[in-house]
Amino acid sequence: MNKFIFVSGGVCSSLGKGVAASSLGALLEGRGLNVRMVKCDPYINVDAGTMSPYQHGEVYVTDDGAETDLDLGNYARFTKSPLSRANSITTGQVYDAVIRKEREGRYLGRCVQVIPHITDEIKARILAVAKEDPDTDVIIVEIGGTVGDIESIPFLETARQIIHEMGRENVLSVHLTLLPEVAGGELKTKPTQHSVKAMQEQGIQPDILICRAPVMLDEATRRKIALFTNVAPDAVFTSYDVSTTIYEIPLIFSEQKLDQVVLSRMGVVSRHADLSSWCSMMERFAARKGKVRIGIVGKYMELHDAYKSVYEALFHAGLEGGVEVELVKIDSSRLEGLDNVDSILGPEAEGGGVDGILVPGGFGQRGISGMVKAAAWARLNKVPYFGVCLGMQIMVIDWARHVLGLEDADSTEFNQETRHPVVSLMEEQEDITAYGATMRLGNWDCVAEQNTLILAAYGDKDIRERHRHRYEFVNRYRQEMSAAGLRLAAFTPDGKLVECVEWPDHPWGLGVQFHPEFKSKPTSAAPLFRDFIAAARDVRSKGAQ
């Protein structure tokens, strides 16, 4: 029988349920178990695809093209769990499915209700993940939101039913709470007590508590929490604030024997933990020497989670390159009114300027001219540049305007009237008015050309990466761009779409239409991010000589 672990949160949001669930998954994989991860999101949107990054952070894309919550990115970075649209369950999906069944008459005229019909649909989706692979041992289900939220109730009720039907030896409830620190450094346990009480009111007694706190809980505090929550003292753990990296958290949980307690509660016998890859990663973290400053020139700089996977991929590349990566977040709108961007990007800028420029993905016209200025500055000053999705399109626009002399060259996304639409919609996208899940999404193949940076990065001409975009390089400008020196470095297998462009006579200037950040891991950096950081490190090193 499969084992299930439901991870819920209390007191407030943004406590790190996704990281806690992912870390637990990593620990169980280290014990030789086959783990699957599932995220239940209470929002009524069908998926995260049409949400503003300011609302819910980045949209994480899976191999099969599902647009999901960013926590699936955590699952991918921490665990080996295969991820698809089945691993992301939303209230919108559930209600849409139930209403469609009702319209088809599949409920035989019965009154359709939250219990059992909505909870049965949630349950069926969770169990479907468990049945995908007969070798699956543990399914970790993260329930989004906070206990007490009205939106989360159907998911918690589903968890209660699964616990009741399968027995507590097969299903665990792990609850993450907050211990706030008040004046004098005292940690208050009352919010955790109330949070567990709210879970009990939903019919669920947490088996394990993970307490977010500034410091490690002492034995007296753990025993007090256990006494007031009906949780065993050895099942109260601390997720304290780390000064290193979130990737140390699996090791921190391991030191507290979280995996041992989980396995004991579920009656699972496993081998000794093998966390050598995580220990090796932390050794690389400690061994880093020097740093590179990378300017992220984007549209959504106020919220860190808007470019979560990009930032993590840069960190991974720094681990592999042996350097600290300092993120210099630059709102592209700041560059728009400047004739010379040296004051922000150059050596005289605050902090000493940047060693590399990365322009990430995005939608809409705001800040685009600032991105073009950043790309032109990197090209002319021989500063390593990496364009991801929109960032590649920015390279194309810059080249058309400033090398070919096509002054009004643009993307039709930003200027429908441009005389030189060097970037435009794919034909099949032109008549679309409903935007959810209608882009080029998920894994697509491309083929790298010989003697290119992209081929050197991957070491193989056949490349498979994830996409999330609607606009493409316009093919009628291929010959003109190439004649002026722009290297068209990769294409779709049929040769119809340009997937990568590179600057000639430049230390490292490359843009790709896909999103390599989605496959980057702390134990294995994405090849293009790795080479970008290596180029920035080498340029900085030469400048210091």
Image: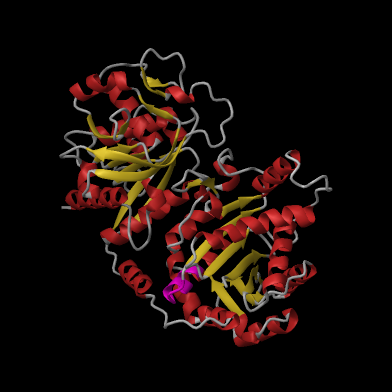
Query: Residue at 34% of width from left, 67% of height from top?
Result: 285
The residues colored magenta run: 25-33
Q: Which of 345 and 34 is in front in this view?
A: 34
Asked whether, in this view, residue 121 is left or right of residue 491, the answer is: right
Asked whether, in this view, residue 302 is left or right of residue 195, the answer is: left
Residue 490: % across, % down: 26, 36
Residue 228: % across, % down: 74, 81
Residue 420: % across, % down: 36, 15
Residue 219: % across, % down: 61, 87
- Is residue 387 magenta-colored? no
Query: Residue at 73% of width from left, 69% of height from top?
Result: 195
- What is the quadrant of residue 9 in the picture? bottom right
Query: Residue at 50% of width from left, 30% of height from top?
Result: 364
Residue 81, compared with residue 56, is above or below; it is below
Query: How many marks overall?
Result: 0
- What is the quadrant of residue 408 in the picture? top left
**Colour style of the rendered protein structure:** secondary structure
